[in-house]
Amino acid sequence: MNGRGNRPDNSARTRGPFAPWTDPDALPLVRFEAVSKHFAGVTAVDALTLDIYPGEFFALLGPSGCGKTTLLRMLAGFQTPDAGRVLLDGTDITDVAAHRRPVNMMFQSYALFPHLTVAGNVAFGLKQDGLPKDEIAARMAEMLRLLRLEGLETRKPHQLSGGQRQRVALARALVKHPRVLLLDEPLAALDKKLRGETQFELMRLKERLGLTFVIVTHDQEEAMTVANRIGVMNHGRLIQVATPSEIYEQPNSRWVADFIGDVNLIEGRIVKADAAGTTIASASVGTLRTAAVADARPGDAVAVALRPEKIRIARDMPVGDVNRVEGEVWEIGYLGDFSIYKVRLGDAFVINTAAANVTRLIERPVGIGDRVWLTWAADAGVVLTQ
Amino acid sequence: MTPATQPRAEARSWGQRLVILIPYLWLIAFFLVPFLIVFKISLSQYATAQPPYLPQLDITGGFETLREFVSELSFAGYARLVSDSLYLSSYGRSLAIALASTAMLLVLGFPIAYGMARAPRQWQGVLFMLIVLPFWTSFLIRVYAWMTILQRDGLLNQALLALGIVDTPPVWISTDIAIFIGIVYTYLPFMVLPIYATLERMDESLFEAAADLGCPRWKAFWLVTVPLALPGIIAGSLLCFIPIVGEFVIPDLLGGSGAMMIGQTLWLEFFGNRDWPAASAVAVVLLALLIVPLVLYQHVQARRLERGD
C-alpha cells in the first residue's frame, strides 16, 4: 500500500479496497504503544494503543475532554506521554522535540503569524529547513495554486476571510510535505456550507498529495465524511476503531451506538442465541428477532440498537408477530428531506423513526395522534452486550 | 473602526457636538494657549521689569501699538541657543542620557515583562501590582530615598563593605551612575507595562506553530515573539525616552553639579537668571526635538488601533 486510498483507478482496482488495517503484513506509519497522559490527577489518555497506516485518513472522534486532542498533541510533540511510546515509521519519537518531527499540524485557531504575509506564513516552515530560495518559491507557488490562494501572497492574516485563513493554515502545514498531517478541529470555525465543501477538499488534497491525515473532531458527520477509519474515544480510551459504516452499522457498545447518530436502544434479555441469529425479549416492544449473531447466552441482559431510518412506519398491521410494535404518533419533526416521528408505546417508551419525504408533505399519510405500526427487518437490529 | 463609519457631522446633535468640543476646549485652554504664551515670551527680550521681559502685549492700544509690539519681537534668543555651547551640550547630554537609559530600560524591562506574561495566570495579578506599587509613594520621596541609599555611608556602601566586596566605600551619589540608577528605577514600569500588554495576549499556539514548522524555541523568540512585541517595545521606549529627555528632579538630586541636562539648564535660566525669554526658547526647542518621537508614538498607536488590537 502506498497511500492510493480507495481512488477508483487501476492500481486500486487490482489491489482491492484500501484496508491496510486488515492486512497482517502491513506496517503502520504511526503507532501509539500503551501511551498514557495525566494532567493534575486527571487521566487524559489511558494506556492507549493504536496503529495508523500510510495513506490513511484517520479521525479521532469523541466528546470534549475525551483525550483526542491530547493524543494528537503527543504525535505533534507538544506533549510527552507519561508512559508508553509513540513510533513513526517504526522509529521511537517519544522524546523527539516538536521542531524535529516530520509531522505538521493545522491548528484549530489556525495560529497564523499575524505579523507575516500569506507568503511569509507559508514559507516559514521551508525557511526553517534552510532550503534554497528558488525551491522555497516553487513549492510555495505550487501550494498556493493548489489551495486557490494566488494573488493573496502579500495580504496579512487580518485581511483575509475565515475560509482563506483556513486555507493558508492548511497550505503552511502541507507545504512541508509532512509524513503525517495533523488536523485539530480544522473546520470548527467555518459555517456549515463551507465546512461541507472543505471536507471534500481535504479528501481530494490527501489523495492528490498521497499523504496520511489524522484529524481530531467532535463532529461525527465530519468524521464519517472524510475518514477511512474512525477511532471513537471516551475517557482517554479508544472505544471502537473501525470504518465509518462499521461504526454506524455495527457499533460495539451502547455508548458508541448512542454517540454516533440517532439510535433507539431497546433493553431486553436473550431468549435464544445461535448461528442463525438472536431472539430477545423486551418489556417495551415485545419479542425482537435479529439476524445478528450475539456473543451472549440466554438470560443475559443486552440492548438492541435500532437506527430510526431502519424502522418502517405504517397505519396497517403488518404480518408476523416479531419485530413489530403498535404505538401512537407523539411528535413529528419535519426536516425537509425527511421527517422524524416520535412514537409512544404504552406510557413512557418512545421510539424514534425517520422516513424520507419521498412524497410531498401535503400527501403525508401519518399525523400526530395516529395509531401506527412500526416494523423492522431482521438485519436491522444490532445486539449490544456492553 | 475609523471615524468614517460614524454618522456625518451635520447629523450630530448639539449634545454630541458639545461632548466632542469639551476635550478640544480643554486642550486649547491648557496646552495651546500656554504654549503660545511661552512662544511669545521666547521672542521677547530680557528686561528688569515686572514681568521680566519686553515687549508687553497691550491689546487695548489699537492697531498701531500692535504693529509696534510685533516689530519688537525677535529670534535673538534662539540664536543664543546655538552660539552658547552651554545649551548645545545640555541638549546633547539629555539626549545621550535618555538614549542610554532607554536602552538599559529595554534590556531590563523586556525580560521582566516576558517573565510576567509567562508566569502562571494566578500570579500575574500579583506581579502586576508589584510593578505598579511604587507609584503609591510620592516620586520625590522615592528619589530622596535613593539619595540616602547611594550616599557615602548609605545602605548600598554599608552592604558592599559588610559583604567584603569593596574595602573603601565607592562614590555613587553625584555621579552619572546615580542618575542612571534613578532613571531606570523610576521609569521601569513605563517600559514593562506596554511590553507586558503585548506579550500577555500573545497566542501560545503561535509558538507551537513555530515549533511545528521546524523552528527551535530560541529562534521563535526572534522570529515571532520580538516582532509581535514590537508595538509594545516602541511604545515603552518612547514612553520612557520622551520624559527622560526633559528630566529635572533625578539629575538635580542624584547627579553632580558639573554637566547639566536640559531640564536643569531651563530651571537655571528661569529661576537663577530670571531670564524668561531664554528659558522659553530652551523649552520651545525641547518641544520641537520631542515632536519627532511623539509623532512616531502617535503613528504606532494609530496603526495598532487600525489593526484592531
Image (cartoon, coloured by chain):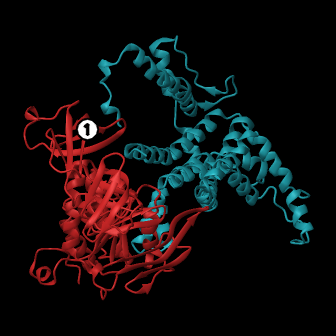
Chain colours: A red, B cyan
Number of marks in picture? 1
The reply to whether residue A114 is visible in this rendering is no
Residue type, mark 1 in image:
Gly
Measured from the top left, where is residue B152 in percent x and y?
89, 58
Q: Is residue A27 left or right of residue A206?
A: right
Q: Position of residue A245 (x, y in %)?
A: 24, 64
Please tell me in which quadrant of the rendered image residue A368 appears.
top left
At x 31%, y 25%, the residue is B7
Q: Quadrant of residue A360?
A: top left
Q: Position of residue A351 (x, y in %)?
A: 29, 44
Residue A303 vs B6, above or below: the answer is below
Position of residue A89 measured from the top left corner of the image (x, y, whole percent): 37, 85
Specify the subunit that label 1 lies on: A
Residue positioned 12% across, 84% down in the render: A14
Looking at this view, is B18 or A199 the one in front? A199
Residue at coordinates 52% horizontally, 73% vertically from top-left? A81
Residue B260 visible somewhere in the drawing: yes
Name the residue at the bottom extreme.
A25
Which residue bears the numbered disc 1?
A327
- In front here: B270 or B79? B270
Kind of element beneath mark 1 = strand
Of the 4 image quadrants, the one containing the N terminus of chain B is: top left
User: In this rendering, is residue B159 above or below B243?
Assistant: below
Q: Quadrant of residue A105?
A: bottom left
A380 over A138 or under it: above or below: above
Q: Residues within 10 Å of mark 1 (few under 14, many from 20)?
A: many
